[in-house]
Image (tube, rainbow, N blue to C red):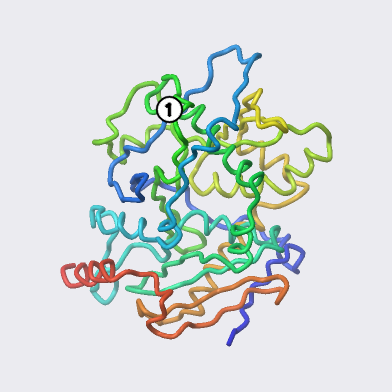
Amino acid sequence: MFSVTNLYPDPRHPGRQSRSFPTISKPNLVEFFSVTEERKYDASATQLKYLTLPPMPRSDLHLDLNEGFEICRPKPDSAKTEGIDMLLNNIRQSDPRKMWTVNEEGQARLKHDFVCFRGLLRMISCTPYDWKTPWIVQAIRYGGTIYLCERATPEKQEAERNETEQQKRFCYYGFKFEQHILTEKPGSTPDTSAPVVLAEEFCAMFDTTLVGSRLLYGAEMDGIVAKKQLDREGLTVDELRKFEFVEVKVKRRETNQRQVDNFYRFKTKNWWCQSFLVNIERLVVGLRDDHGIVHEIEEMKLSDIQRNSRPYWSPAVCMNFCADFLAEVSRVLGKEDNSQRVYQFEYDSKANKCVRYRTLEVGHPDAFLPEWYTSYVEERRRNK
């Protein structure tokens, strides 16, 4: 049985356009980790990559993004059932002084009100403009912190089952372009004959406060700008903070104004939200043709993306809706504090014009906090 929230994503809803940008602190890097091809957690920066652009001049640039499509190594099926385990692993293995505090009752608790992936925050933020795209988010309040986990909708599962080779190839283009310009060592020549391994990741953990709620979220990061090789095994957070992160993208080169307008209307809000949440100011974009060949690389500033997108969508609407969603989740969960109690929030424009929620029975298989993590939390609470 669903209950209805007060969240109406429609950006034309009264009051949405008139609200100013919500208060948010500058996202701060607090931790990082890597994920291996076997989807094993690695506390080091072994998967960190460096931005290495092709030498100038680039007038004869010809990067074939189709190369190696047939030998690409996809993520294992187990990745679909990970939930937020990688984030929980990072919390468990981090210095407790970074993550924990003591509440008014004298109990140890995480410093953060919410824990999730950046992708979930991006998805929620873009809902006012992606209002035809359904989503499911599950929430558990445990130890005073709300954990959020995205679940695949039936529509998404159906789309994945029916994905065409062309759709798979377009998705592959982004990963292949990364292989061309992100390298193991600064300035080294990329080995583009090697298979693209989709399971390997470098992830960073960020901390920010949005309208009074303190958030901790993990984000897969593309690469950094650095001239010298770093000790990726012994790298510290303080050292990594000194370097600039960049976001790498691929898009089809526009040939007319309608295509340019569609790019700013439909694409850039996701790019902006994704980069804004991890304090990235520069995007490196490969411009491809219809055959998957990149002939030009363009650098885009986040401020320029925001300015040029102004006729089509508003960053204030996006971030206010994200803040409203978090506040509504907090209100719905109330004082509930049970690692086995899952609240499911759903948005489906076909069924309703607002976000709905329901509670799942205690012990439901979707209770996504594993026993090894809840045992760790209980230990921290006993040994504050």
Residue at horizontal 60 percent and vertical 12 percent from the top: 57
Residue at horizontal 46 percent and vertical 66 percent from the top: 148
Q: Position of residue 243 (x, y in %)?
A: 40, 32
Quadrant where the N terminus sits is: bottom right
Q: Position of residue 32 (x, y in %)?
A: 34, 46
- Asked if residue 348 lies left or right of residue 107, the reply is right
Q: From what the image shows, is residue 20 above or below residue 246? A: below
Q: Position of residue 114 (x, y in %)?
A: 43, 64
Q: Which one is in front, 43 or 212?
A: 43
Q: Which residue is mark 1?
A: 183
Q: Which one is in front, 26 or 204?
A: 204
Q: Which residue is most to the front?
A: 70
Other-residue count near label 1 (Cα within 10 Å), few / some / many at <14 / 14–19 / ≥20:
many
Residue at horizontal 72 percent and vertical 49 percent from the top: 266
Q: Position of residue 186 (x, y in %)?
A: 40, 23
Q: Amino acid at mark 1?
A: Thr
Residue at horizontal 55 percent and vertical 48 percent from the top: 274
- Asked if residue 76 lies left or right of residue 276, the reply is left
